[in-house]
């Protein structure tokens, strides 16, 4: 799992050089690879060093993760939850 972060929402791994090869191997082994929203191998690169998040592994677990992300994808809701867990103020989280 290599998710996007607040500072790097698109992730850090390069789609063509890192995520696609791992996604291809995972799928050939019966697993799955996703950026959290769609299959890695279905993403068409728009630039050479395009970055992406990557979740790779067991097919069921990756699908469960996609469902979780879809359910909790509201950025403000996630930030509020993070602030309440860490006890930080809104200003410090930015």
Image (cartoon, grey):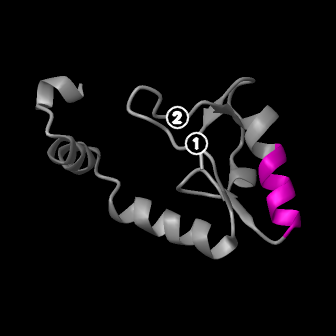
Quarter of the image with the C terminus is: top left
Give x and y (percent) for residue 56. Answer: 68, 56
Give x and y (percent) for residue 7. Answer: 41, 26
Left or right: 56 in relation to 71: right
Region in magenta = 21-29
| Tag shown at residue 62 | none
Label 2 vs 1, first from the N-terminus: 2
Please tell me whether residue 4 is drawn above or below residue 92 in the rendered image.
below
| Tag shown at residue 53 | 1
Left or right: 91 in relation to 14: left
Q: Residue at x 13, y 24 (%)?
A: 91
Q: Secondary structure at mark 1?
A: loop
Left or right: 85 in relation to 89: right
Instruction: Tell me if mark 2 has few (under 14), some (14-19) or many (20+) residues whose alpha carbon lies within 10 angstroms of its own.
Output: some
Judge by depth and name the residue closer to the eye, 41 or 61. Answer: 61
Q: Residue at x 60, y 66 (%)?
A: 62
Q: Residue at x 62, y 76 (%)?
A: 60
Q: Secondary structure at mark 2?
A: loop
Give x and y (percent) for residue 57. Answer: 70, 62
Please tell me whether residue 67 is drawn above or below residue 73 in the rendered image.
below
Judge by depth and name the residue closer to the eye, 36 or 3. Answer: 3
Q: Main secondary structure of the magenta part?
A: helix
**Residue on which the image places disc 2:** 10
Distance Cα–Cα, label 2 vs label 1 = 6 Å
Kindly check if marks 2 and 1 are in contact, taking CB atoms under 8 A apart as contact.
yes
């Amino acid at each position: 799992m290599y998710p996007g972060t607040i500072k790097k929402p698109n992730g850090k791994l390069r789609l063509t050089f890192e995520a696609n090869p791992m996604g291809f191997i995972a799928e050939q082994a019966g697993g799955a690879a996703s950026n959290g929203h769609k299959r890695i191998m279905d993403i068409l690169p728009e630039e050479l060093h395009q970055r992406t998040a990557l979740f790779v592994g067991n097919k069921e677990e990756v699908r469960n993760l996609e469902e979780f992300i879809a359910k909790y994808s509201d950025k403000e809701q996630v930030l509020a939850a993070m602030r309440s867990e860490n006890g930080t103020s809104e200003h410090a989280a930015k």
